[in-house]
Image (tube, grey):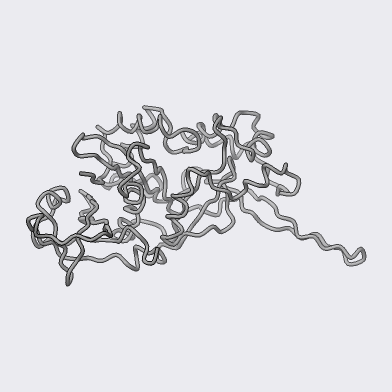
Amino acid sequence: MMIIRYIKPTDVNDLYQLAQKAGFGLTSLQPNMEKLAARIQRACDTVAGKLDKVDQVYLFVLEDTKLKKVVGVCGIEVALGLKEPWYNFHVGTQVHASEPLNVYKALPTLYLSNDHTNCSELCTLFLDPDYRLNKNGKFLSKVRFLFLSAFKQYFEETIVAEMRGYSDEKGQSPFWNAVGHKFFDIEFTKADYLSGVGQKAFIAELMPRHPIYVDMLPEDAKAVIGMVHPNTMPAYNLLLGEGLRYKGYVDIFDGGATIQADIENLRAIKESLVVTVRVEQSENINLSEEPLIVANDEYENYRAILSYSQPIENILYLDAEQAKQLNVQDGSQVRLLTVNVQGK
């Protein structure tokens, strides 16, 4: 059985193995044991109420309970940019016009921006390739929205998500080669790693403060501005279905799209339901083809599972094993959300 729960310190070895499989571009999941352990502790301290907002992060893991193995991870940063600056490029427009010459040119530009300061962020989504089946990917990503709907008071009004931009199988990024490399003179993978482990000061020190004219970039770099890596497209489309949208912000390293939404406009806020549990023998439960994410809404011991049971008159029937994994019993209340967006 697959469950989602908070991360804990004993997960560090499994998390390190996931980081090794993640490859290029996932800055918040680097194979560095010390940094991973520190991030896990930060997540645990967040739940325990020991940290100020500036340091808070929630990390969830997908566990194969049969093997007692962590096979996926996802997270939510509570507030960006309050401790160290949060950077991206805003794709804007600068107009050059001359009436005597009858010239009017609207030129796309890239401005270094801190506009997402004090936003919450969906982050650190990675699922072991061997487990990319049986709705596990959707389950892992969307559980964060169910958590947000239950505990939105702990987060900011706007949620953002940085999507991995295009890079080839050798880790080469056309956008980095045309922009970042000119100012940093280091390889994309190294810059990406340094940012991922928290060494971001060099960005402020070396990135240009004046607008970059997009038309002056090579064609291969222009083509990937706002593009999402092919491996990330399923996650991108999933987030669009939950209410996030591209608003013209891109990653300063690879040019990948940053998408955002007001938390109040998320599908989970509008459509999640709180129902009462009835524990039944599994053979007595009528199952559906449409899965639900079911969570116990216990802040200190958050758990979620996938269930193919459907609520009937605000009653959700679970078998004894499901109830045990959720740490609920007959009469408990749970929150649920359909995995699939209605009509899709």
Outermost bottom residue: 313
Q: Position of residue 40 (x, y in %)?
A: 32, 37
Q: Nearer the viewer, residue 293 or 266?
A: 293
List x then y, in percent, for residue 109. Answer: 70, 52
Would you place residue 12 above or below residue 243 in this image?
Answer: above
Residue 192 as seen in the image, left or right of residue 318: right
Q: Residue at x 43, y 60 (%)?
A: 241
Quadrant location, the C terminus: bottom left
Where is residue 301? Give x, y as percent: 20, 48
For the residue pair 156 and 61, the one nearer the viewer reads as: 61
From the viewer's perspective, is 235 left or right of 185?
A: left
Residue 221 in the image: x percent, y percent? 67, 42
Q: Quadrant of residue 167?
A: top right
Query: Is 188 left, or right, of 273 in this rendering?
Result: right
What residue is rendered at 35% in x and 54% in y? 142
How many marks can you see? Answer: 0
Say whether residue 141 is left or right of residue 116. left
Closer to the camera in the image, 154 or 229: 229
The answer to which quarter of the image holds residue 312 is bottom left
Q: Quadrant of the N terminus?
A: top left
Measuring 66% from the left and 56% from the top, which residue is drawn there? 92
Task: Say which quarter of the image contains residue 294.
Answer: bottom left
Say which residue appears at 8% left-offset and 58% top-offset: 280
Camera-nearest residue between 141 and 282: 282
